[in-house]
Amino acid sequence: MEKYDYLIVGAGLFGAVFAHEAKRVGKHCLVIDKRNHRGGNIYCEDIEGIHVHKYGAHTVSYTHLTLPTNREV
């Protein structure tokens, strides 16, 4: 059985950075997460060849973006 210094529940921003920094100083971490990607609410997805940043449940689809009509904007 492998031994760990830390069990990190959640591979979000804090968990991922903590695991990275702990490993840098020689610690062993086990990171678990219910999602199938790292970064928690901060992750990217490839949609039709376009790198789309996803931010939790509040995502913006590139097909719904509009440009402002006011020239001063």
Image: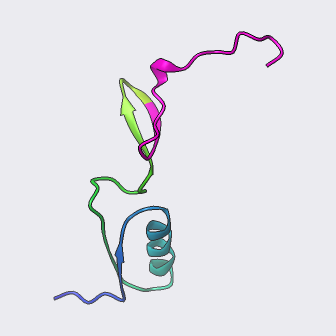
Side of 29 relative to 58 (left or right): left
Where residue 28 sits: x, y (%)?
A: 36, 83
Whether 12 is drawn above or below 4: the answer is: above
Q: Is residue 7 above or below residue 48?
A: below
Seen as rendered, the residue at the extreme right is 72
The residue lying furthest to the left in this view is 1
Apparent side of residue 25 relative to residue 48 in the rendered image (left or right): right
Residue at 44% in and 79% down: 23
Q: Residue at x 33, y 53 (%)?
A: 37
The reply to whether the magenta stretch includes residue 53 is yes
Q: Position of residue 35 (x, y in %)?
A: 29, 56
Magenta stretch containing residue 46, yes or no?
no
* Residue appearing at x 45%, y 86% in the figure: 26
How many numbered marks does the figure carry? 0
Residue 50 x %, y % = 43, 27
Q: Nearer the viewer, residue 60 or 52?
A: 60
Quarter of the image with the N terminus is bottom left
Question: What x and y, as percent, mark residue 3?
Answer: 26, 90
Question: Does 60 sit above or below residue 10?
Answer: above
Q: Which residues are magenta?
A: 51-73
- Prevailing secondary structure class for the magenta stretch in the rendered image: loop
The quarter of the rendered structure image containing the C terminus is: top right
